[in-house]
Amino acid sequence: MKESRRTGRTSLQGWIAYGSLLAGFCWVLFFSYFTIRESIPDRIRIEKGQEESFDFHLPLTGEVEQEGLEVFGNQSPAVDAGRIRLNLSQSFSLKSQEQGRYSISCKLFGLIHMKEVAVEVVEEKQVVPCGIPVGIYVKTDGIMIIGTGTVTGSDGMNYEPAANLVQSGDYLKTVDGAVVESKESLIEKINQSQGKAIVLGILREGEYIRLKLQPVKAAEGEYKLGIWVRDDLAGVGTLTYYDAEGSYGALGHPVSDMDTGLKVNVGEGTLYEAGIAGITKGEKGNPGEISGVITYTDECCLGDVKENTEVGIYGSLENIPKLAENAYPIALKQDIQEGNATIISSVSGERKEYSITITEMDYNSLNKGILFQVTDPELLHLTGGIIQGM
């Protein structure tokens, strides 16, 4: 009887060990799949008429459209006519004489689909690098809701009329069907309700919804909804470049709300001249920042803000900054190499080049694809490295 129990216990332990081994193996496969998938770039660009080389260093095969796109590399016959199969663990090159979009279908073991890599053929473009401070003023596209709060009513009780209805990042577009474009017009509409329920038209993650809220008469006699809102933002950033047509790019990151951290839906926006007023040096745990002064006059208006994207703001310049600088061709990601380089900044009050060392490239990152260290002694003394606003 004792021997039978010992055998049963040993068998159970064996099954547990087998199950743990199987679970661990599945986890390794799962982790490996997503690690490889995230290592594949979503998009690559090649310049029209130029042969561009790539090396994914991944155990994958890629099927590429042959029509309109020349492919050089470790090719093997593809299953479908008109497509080329590549070994993506080794280097390959692409070339096209026409602008357009193509794709590389990446597969593991030639069977498991991993990702479609967009291939964009672009014209050569030249830009003037800037590195100068600019003032940015934008109106939100709708009134941005940043949170909810408590209203103390005229009866002394506390109310939360908007709690669990509106959310941070919602954009208030209408009140009872009428468009509202400013905080002042919203306050006026709420007071006109005299406490009757109103319907808010809200844009939430691209979907338009309607919400009914009951304003509360506050202790001071005004009617309130208990929501915190914002309809404009301003700050100082860096103008990155402009081109021959006067189009520019700035910041290198989106204009985000300071309270929610969310990217702002921009309506109208203006770019102004700005000056650096002070520097908070960066330290461990503190990114540091530049504080500036914006000159809000027509004479100091540089241009407009048309787009707010994950990689910066874009628009057109009416007044081109006077820079003693020639235009340079844009380097594509695959052309950037690790090693010594320079950045341009006006952080000292004077537009200068500072030395850096590029230590790593992430070809799948939108706006944080280059990891580098500041090596210039003057810049390190001035800022401690890269700080907010540069």
Image (tube, helix red, strand yellow):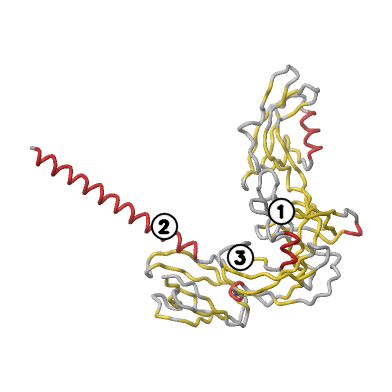
The CA distance from mark 2 to mark 1 is 36 Å
**Is residue 94 shown left or right of residue 128?**
left
Task: Please name whichever residue, 95 or 198, is drawn nearer the observer in this view of the structure.
Answer: 95
- Give the class, few, some or many, for how many residues have Cα within 10 Å of label 3's Cα (few <14, many ≥20): few
Task: Please name whichever residue, 284 or 266, is drawn nearer the observer in this view of the structure.
Answer: 284
* Residue found at x 84% / y 74%: 324
Residue type marked 3: Leu
Q: Can residue 295 be seen from the camera position used here?
A: yes
The CA distance from mark 3 to mark 2 is 24 Å
Q: Quadrant of residue 158?
A: top right
* Residue found at x 74% / y 64%: 379
Pointers 3 and 2 in contact (C-beta within 8 Å): no
Position above or below: 232 against 114: above
Residue type marked 1: Gly
Q: Which residue is mark 2?
A: 31
* Residue found at x 68% / y 74%: 330
